[in-house]
Image: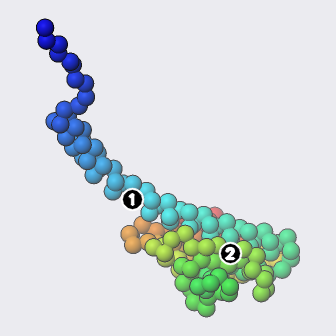
């Protein structure tokens, strides 16, 4: 009498078919995932700067003093003298740093229309824009109107 044992498992052909299907799906999904990551970097940078601008405006009104938002130098200890805000931003009351906004990514460039934006005690400022971009044509823009409102995606109402 001979006994036959049934063998369970996958054949080499079945494994190759599954690996091929996974490779095809990955080649379709990975580029769109990269775009998602890049878009999230732009969005998170925009949101961080919007939060800093809103903080500066509310602090200026509450403390009845001038509060500035500026691009930071490389060690985040002082404002940068130019309009390149890519190394992060600072919220300052005089010489006191209220908040440091670190850069989200070195691949994101941030350019302000002025080296700093200063909110008066009544919450107003001069109109300004901040452009946030990466290596793609996609970019974001923050607009600040004269009454101090900061918004992204176009002109403030």
Front in this rendered view, residue 109 or 3: 3
Residue 59 relative to residue 128: left or right: right
Mark 2: few, some, or many residues within 10 Å (few <14, many ≥20)?
some
| Residue beneath the point at 24% across and 43% down | 19
Front in this rendered view, residue 88 or 152: 88
Front in this rendered view, residue 61 or 109: 109
- In this view of the protein, can residue 101 be seen by the observer? yes
- Which residue is tagged 1? 34
Front in this rendered view, residue 90 or 130: 90
Q: Position of residue 130 (x, y in %)?
A: 56, 75
Placement of the N terminus among the 4 image quadrants: top left
Q: Is 61 placed above or below 39 here?
A: below
Q: Position of residue 74 (x, y in %)?
A: 59, 85
| Residue beneath the point at 54% across and 79% down | 86
- Which residue is tagged 2? 100
Q: Secondary structure at mark 1?
A: helix
Between marks 2 and 1, how big is the CA–CA gap? 28 Å
| Residue 79 placement: quadrant | bottom right
Check the image and tell me how it is coloured: rainbow
Q: Is 40 placed above or below 66 here?
A: above
Q: Secondary structure at mark 2?
A: strand
| Residue beneath the point at 78% across and 83% down | 96
Q: Position of residue 57 (x, y in %)?
A: 75, 71
| Residue beneath the point at 20% across and 18% down | 5
- In this view of the protein, can residue 127 be seen by the observer? no
Residue 133 relative to residue 14: left or right: right
| Residue 45 placement: quadrant | bottom right
């Amino acid at each position: 009498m001979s006994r036959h044992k049934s063998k369970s498992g996958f054949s080499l052909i079945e494994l190759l078919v599954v690996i091929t299907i996974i490779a095809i799906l990955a080649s379709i999904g990975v580029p769109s995932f990269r775009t998602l990551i890049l878009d999230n970097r732009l969005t998170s940078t925009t949101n961080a700067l919007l939060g800093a601008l809103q903080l500066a405006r509310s602090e200026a009104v509450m403390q009845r003093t001038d509060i500035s938002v500026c691009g930071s130098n490389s060690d985040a200890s002082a404002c940068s003298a130019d309009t390149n805000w890519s190394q992060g931003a600072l919220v300052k009351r005089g010489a006191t740093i209220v908040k440091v906004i670190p850069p989200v990514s070195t691949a994101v460039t941030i350019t302000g229309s002025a080296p700093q934006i200063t909110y008066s005690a009544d919450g107003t400022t001069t109109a300004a824009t901040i452009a946030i971009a990466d290596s793609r044509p996609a970019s974001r823009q923050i607009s600040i109107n004269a009454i101090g409102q900061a918004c992204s995606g176009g002109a403030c109402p």
